[in-house]
Amino acid sequence: MMLRTSLLSGLLLQAAPRRWLLARLARAWPAPPPGTRFGAYFSGRAALFAIARSPAFTRRVALLPAYLCNVVPLAFERAGWQVHGYEVDERFMPDASGLRALAEACGADLLLLAPLYGSDGGMAHWLGDDAAAWRSRRGVALVFDLCQDAALLQQLLRSPGPRWAAVLSFNDKSFPGVMGACAWGDLPLESPPPPGWRERWLLAAWALRKCLPARRSDASTPAFDHSTAARFPYGFDPLGASALQLALGLVGLARLPRWVARRRDAVARGDVHPLPLPFSTGAPFVVVDAADPARHRRKRPYALAHDANASLRPQLVVRHNKGFDDR
């Protein structure tokens, strides 16, 4: 019932003026640092592409986690960047000293952090004063890819330091939605036009379909999660968010605490057994231990960026724990 109520609320709210929706979404993050800009985009990948095309960068060398949704390096490569992957440990944490050495060796001017499956992903370290001072000396921007867990925006209540951006996605992971994304930061970003009528009708049909009884797809094939970006709605077109996406994002962020509470209830009941990562009890996807009862749908491991048939972590077992029944 909560799933359908959220989607129907978004369908109704899209009639509100676009300027009002944008203003409300911009205020969804309480007390952002001074000088913070806001933008809304058609998808998370479009938002990352906009960051990659920002005129703030000259060297255009990016450091990204080696284990990550492959659409992220693809966004930077399509924008003409040189991409270097950095390793993360079993808790999806990077080695801070190793990252600094890599950045200095390759002349990176952007470091992207992507907390996965309830992990910190290096956020605590790179939000510290010492890391901010180092980034300022080296001219390295910091980008937080929070597309998998919008609730982690609350971890950015303190200033990330100079040159930063955070991306949230309305991609049916953190809460019910139909793509769309927003970005905060102090980087200059383009403001693309909203999508055309074709895209708007397709998004509306997608949202209405989700109001019907769920029909789960088989998560066992293909073996790995690989984003080809080959067809609508998975391209990098420089489009802004539609009114429906803005409305669903606004409803989703307002109701996000309820979804997080439902995830924690599932963990407390023993429906899912996540490994003890910093934010695993409220994350929409979790790495599970050997005793997990397998009641929740399995999420496929990410494929390599340029090989849909291989993965850095092919045996990784991750379960959905979104708090709502998705497909």
Image (cartoon, rainbow, N blue to C red):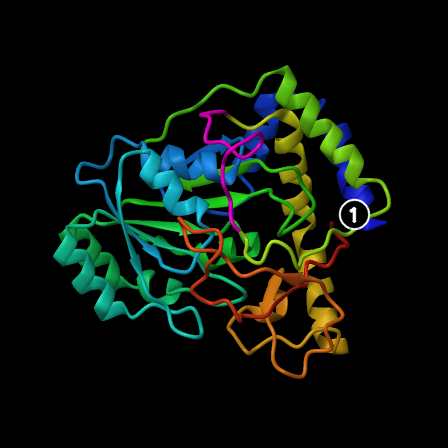
Q: In the picture shown, does residue 8 fall above or below 312?
A: above
Magenta-tinted stretch: 226-239
Per the image, is 230 magenta?
A: yes
Residue at the disc numbered 1: 3
Residue 185 showing in the rendered view: no
Name the residue at 45% across, 73% down: 91
Q: Nearer the viewer, residue 34 or 226?
A: 226
Name the residue at 13% across, 57% down: 105
Q: In the picture shown, does residue 299 fall above or below 112?
A: below
Q: Quadrant of residue 196?
A: top right
Q: Main secondary structure of the magenta part?
A: loop
Residue 140, percent across and down?
22, 50
Per the image, is 22 magenta?
A: no
Residue 250, percent across and down?
64, 38
As shown in the figure, which amino acid type bears the numbered disc 1?
A: Leu
* Mark 1, secondary structure of its residue: helix
Q: Quadrant of residue 87?
A: bottom left
Name the residue at 38% across, 32% down: 50
Residue 154 showing in the rendered view: yes
Q: Nearer the viewer, residue 281 or 29?
A: 281
Count of numbered labels shown in the rendering: 1
Q: Count residues near mark 1 (Cα–Cα under 10 Å), then give few for <14, some for 14-19, many for 20+.
A: some
Furthest toward the front, the residue is 309
Q: Nearer the viewer, residue 308 or 93?
A: 308
Residue 308, percent across and down?
48, 51
- In the rendered structure, the answer to whether residue 282 lies left or right of residue 5 reads left
Furthest toward the bottom, the residue is 291
- In the rendered structure, the answer to whether residue 175 lies left or right of residue 195 reads right
Q: In the picture shown, does residue 275 fall above or below 47?
A: below
